[in-house]
């Protein structure tokens, strides 16, 4: 029973992480595509800011995953 509960938890965890990572990746891709098409400096700045924010968001997710992995291996 414990093994099955652990499996369910891990499957849900992976689904959640996948969703959380796809969102900023989609934002990065969209902002990059818009940046390529922009001619206006103000618009470029706006979408460059989005790229930076979404990159930071992904960086935090990766750091959190690394921390969780470390905590799981020490238990």
Image (spheres, helix red, strand yellow):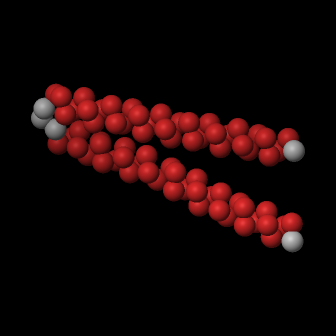
The quarter of the picture where residue 3 lies is bottom right
Quarter that holds the C terminus: top right
Q: Is residue 34 rendered to the left or right of residue 2?
A: left
Residue at image position (46%, 53%) is 22
Residue at image position (34%, 36%) is 50
Residue at image position (65%, 57%) is 13
The quarter of the picture where residue 71 lies is top right
Q: Is residue 2 above or below residue 47?
A: below
Q: Position of residue 52 (x, y in %)?
A: 39, 32
Q: Position of residue 15 (x, y in %)?
A: 59, 61
Q: Position of residue 45 (x, y in %)?
A: 25, 29
- Total labels drawn: 0
Q: Position of residue 58 (x, y in %)?
A: 50, 41
Quarter that holds the N terminus: bottom right
Q: Is residue 71 rendered to the left or right of residue 38?
A: right
Q: Is residue 41 above or below residue 47?
A: above
Residue at image position (19%, 34%) is 43
Q: Is residue 4 above or below residue 67?
A: below
């Amino acid at each position: 029973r414990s093994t099955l509960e652990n499996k369910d938890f891990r499957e849900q965890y992976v689904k959640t992480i996948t969703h959380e990572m796809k969102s900023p990746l989609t934002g990065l891709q969209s902002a990059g595509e818009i940046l390529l098409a922009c001619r206006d400096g103000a618009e470029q700045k706006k979408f460059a800011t989005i790229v930076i924010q979404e990159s930071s968001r992904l960086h935090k997710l990766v750091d959190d995953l690394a921390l969780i992995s470390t905590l799981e291996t020490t238990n």
